[in-house]
Image (spheres, rainbow, N blue to C red):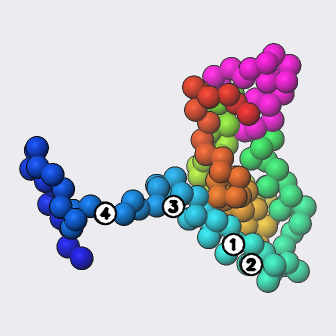
Amino acid sequence: MSPVAAPRPGATATAREVRAPAASLPTLVRLDHVVVFAVCAALLVVHRAEVRWSWFVALFAAIDLVGYLPGAVLVRARGRAPGWAYHLYNAAHGAPFAVALALGYCAATGSPGWALLALPLHLCADRGLLGNGFKDLERPFE
């Protein structure tokens, strides 16, 4: 179906110009992360005997230990998190931090391994399953 030109200013829309609403962008982004989560979870199950589980747990937890825990502690202690806690959360939940963790893992173990699935599993669970994106300073930390 070819796109319909925008109606002229002041003109009324015809039946051909009225379209059903598409899925919202946040819904599509969330669905995208759910699909990646499912693929990574399936790979983890298939290769479970080859996973260095202590590394998996450490990598999975590192994202929240660095990015979430400081802000959460401050919210409980002070009632709010400072701006730097939001920025730290966003940095720890972004791709560059995951890449840094992956490079650290490879340097420490000498090769990539299935434990690295912890990184996309964590990020995609946060975004796809839980609906958590980057933190906005205008909203409460938790």
**Nearer the viewer's eye, disc 4 or disc 1?**
4
Type of amino acid at the residue the image marks with label 2: Ala
Mark 3 near mark 4, Cβ–Cβ under 8 Å? Answer: no
Q: Is residue 13 left or right of residue 141?
A: left
Is the residue marked by circle 3 packed among few (<14), some (14-19), or many (20+) residues within 10 Å? few
- Report which quarter residue 75 is drawn in: top right
Which numbered circle lies on residue 38? 1
Q: Earlier in the sequence, mark 3 or mark 1?
A: 3
Q: Residue at horizontal 46%, vertical 61%?
A: 23
- Say what secondary structure mark 3 lies in: helix
Residue indicated by mark 3:
28
- Report which quarter residue 112 is drawn in: bottom right
Is residue 78 covered in magenta? yes
Residue indicated by mark 4:
19
Is residue 94 covered in magenta? no
Instruction: Residue 132 in the image: state x and y as whole percent.
Output: 66, 47
Q: Which residues are magenta?
A: 67-84
